[in-house]
């Protein structure tokens, strides 16, 4: 608790924004991949990409209709969209500057280089031909900051706040993608009156970089229940809700270890694990996947607010 709240806040948000930039790049890539496999109109898919990014309402205020070019440009470069890749990289660097003395030189340099690269890559509208290369470069830059953080940072409270920001953002992202796609993961197809689409399942896995791990675990014959299980409850999968929540608990426990008391944020994350992430997937489907995901999103929001209070972010 010795760390200044302002420093904790800067670290928390620096790593949230880096994770968000990478997740947004991955979402665009997913949308692009679906668009290439669609025979008909793929604009519906771009609407769902905006919804996953939590940007649909704000987009509609600026644009009359949803089309691929506008959505990609908005998610990549828009200055009015605080969650565009460029805005996120800018915010990550801004927060990194505020806490520069808490970072190793390597982490600062990697963050600064990620921002400079994003600014150059996104200086003008990205052509369809260049899009895969640009998205790949953004993902690599974010991964480089993460690698430098792992490789050079002391395992102390500075590191804890960096990890808490990362895993809160990551859990939120996985939950959002699942929620937008929950209709393809319902256990009973007849209940919805629609035919399940294998391409949709693939994209859910791709958008959270889970396709390789899922194939290793389940082979080719698995369906929606296995995908939901993998992304919600599998503790080995680094983007699952259970994995992210466990990491949040570990880092919060480490932060609180010197105080001799359990803070409200620690109690909340333990409650989340016990109440929501210790069941099997059948229980989740019985509860309702959409309702479950909405509940989890609310819990992650509440946890973020409690962390701000516990560690006096704005003092």
Image (cartoon, rainbow, N blue to C red):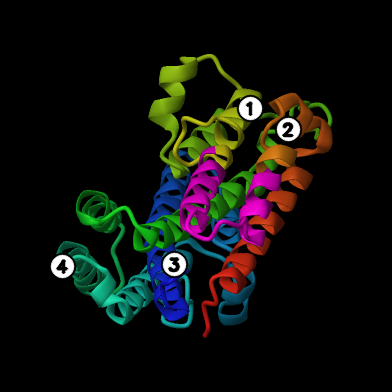
**Relative to 72, is 188 on the left or the right?**
right
The residue carrying pointer 2 sits among few (fewer than 14), some (14 to 19) or many (20 or more) residues within 10 Å by Cα, namely some
Q: Is residue 77 above or below residue 246?
A: below
**Total number of numbered labels?**
4
Label 1 – label 3 distance at C-alpha: 34 Å
Say whether disc 2 or disc 4 marks the residue closer to the N-terminus: 4
Q: Which mark is residue 186?
A: 2
User: Could you tell me which residue is drawn at 22 percent across and 54 percent down?
Assistant: 144
Q: SS at mark 4? A: helix
Q: Which residue is the site of mark 1?
A: 224
In which quadrant of the rendered view does residue 138 lie? bottom left
Q: Secondary structure at mark 1?
A: helix
- Report the residue marked by disc 4: 105
Q: Quadrant of residue 178?
A: top right
* N-term mark: 1 or 3: 3
Closer-to-camera residue (163/61): 163
Q: Which residues are magenta?
A: 243-272
């Amino acid at each position: 608790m010795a760390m200044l709240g302002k420093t904790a806040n800067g670290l928390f948000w620096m790593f949230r924004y880096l994770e968000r930039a990478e997740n947004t790049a991955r979402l665009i890539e997913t949308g692009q991949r679906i668009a290439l496999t669609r025979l008909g109109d793929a604009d519906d898919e771009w609407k769902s990409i905006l919804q996953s990014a939590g940007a649909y309402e704000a987009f509609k205020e600026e644009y009359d209709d949803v089309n691929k070019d506008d959505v990609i440009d908005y998610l990549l470069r828009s200055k009015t969209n605080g969650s565009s890749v460029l805005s996120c990289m800018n915010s990550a660097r801004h927060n990194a500057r505020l806490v520069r003395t808490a970072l190793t030189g390597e982490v600062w340099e990697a963050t600064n280089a990620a921002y400079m690269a994003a600014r150059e890559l996104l200086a003008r509208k990205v052509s369809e031909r260049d899009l895969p290369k640009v998205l790949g470069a953004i993902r690599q830059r974010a991964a480089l900051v993460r690698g430098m953080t792992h490789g050079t940072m002391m395992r102390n409270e500075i590191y804890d706040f960096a990890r808490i920001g990362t895993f809160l953002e990551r859990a939120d992202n996985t939950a959002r993608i699942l929620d937008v796609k929950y209709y393809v993961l319902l256990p009973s197809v007849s209940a919805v009156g629609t035919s399940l689409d294998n391409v949709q399942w693939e994209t859910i896995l791709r958008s959270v970089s889970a396709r390789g791990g899922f194939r290793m675990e389940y082979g080719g014959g698995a369906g929606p229940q296995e995908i939901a299980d993998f992304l919600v409850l599998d503790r080995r999968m680094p983007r699952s809700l259970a994995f992210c929540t466990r990491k949040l608990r570990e880092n919060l426990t480490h932060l609180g270890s010197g105080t001799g008391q359990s803070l409200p944020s620690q109690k909340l994350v333990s409650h989340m694990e016990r109440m929501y992430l210790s069941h099997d997937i059948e229980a989740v489907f019985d509860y309702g996947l959409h309702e479950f995901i909405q509940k989890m999103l609310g819990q992650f929001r509440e946890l973020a607010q409690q962390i701000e209070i516990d560690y006096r972010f704005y003092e």
